[in-house]
Image: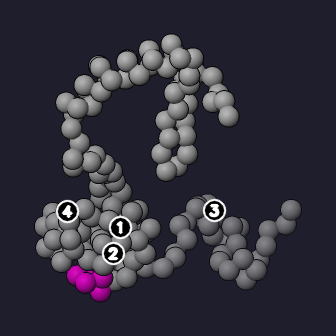
Amino acid sequence: MPLRSASAVGGPAPRDGGPEALRARPAPGRSPRLTLDQVRSISELLWHGPEAYGFRGQVWTCARIAKVIEWEFGARYHKDHVGRLLKGLGWTPRQPIKRAIQRDDEAIQRWRDETWPESRRRARRQRRTLVFEDESGFDLLPGWSRPRP
């Protein structure tokens, strides 16, 4: 296969530039919106907490962080790209624990120890199937047969 001329490819032909012409080069792309020092300072800004920037609650979201970057540096980032920036800084996403405030662990344990075994015994004596139902539909307990209409 013949080598293309320098004008066809947009650079020096390999035969003109030698081995250096064959080296891989990163695509130039767009220059970053933030300097390296600004990116490093994002962590410092986040330690102040979301409430320091007028957000309610103690949870940082990518959309909130994008707003803070815009306010502090004047650079607009999409919330999805903010996640990549944070990953590069060593920040990882955390899911808040979703537990009801009114949860009563003692009542739950009593139900497991007393109410549930009695309900199960009664259902077996009456040859019935226990079905748990909520807004999303219903679910059978493992090992139980399908509910009868």
Residue 35 seen in the current view:
no
The quadrant of the image that shows the N terminus is bottom right
Q: Are the residues at dot 2 and dot 1 in contact (C-beta closer than 8 Å)?
A: yes
Type of the residue with mark 4: Gln
Report which quarter residue 79 is drawn in: bottom left
Is 35 displayed left or right of 121 in the figure?
left
Which one is closest to the eye, mark 3 or mark 2? 2
> Tag 1 or tag 3, which sits nearer the N-term?
3
The residue that mark 3 highlights is 22
Is 14 displayed left or right of 133 in the figure?
right
* Along the line of sight, the residue nearer the viewer: 102 or 39: 102
The residue that mark 4 highlights is 58
Q: Are the residues at dot 3 and dot 1 in contact (C-beta closer than 8 Å)?
A: no
> Tag 4 or tag 3, which sits nearer the N-term?
3
For residue 62, the mark is: 1
Q: Residues within 10 Å of mark 4 (few under 14, many from 20)?
A: few
* Along the line of sight, the residue nearer the viewer: 37 or 99: 99
Q: Residues within 10 Å of mark 2 (few under 14, many from 20)?
A: many
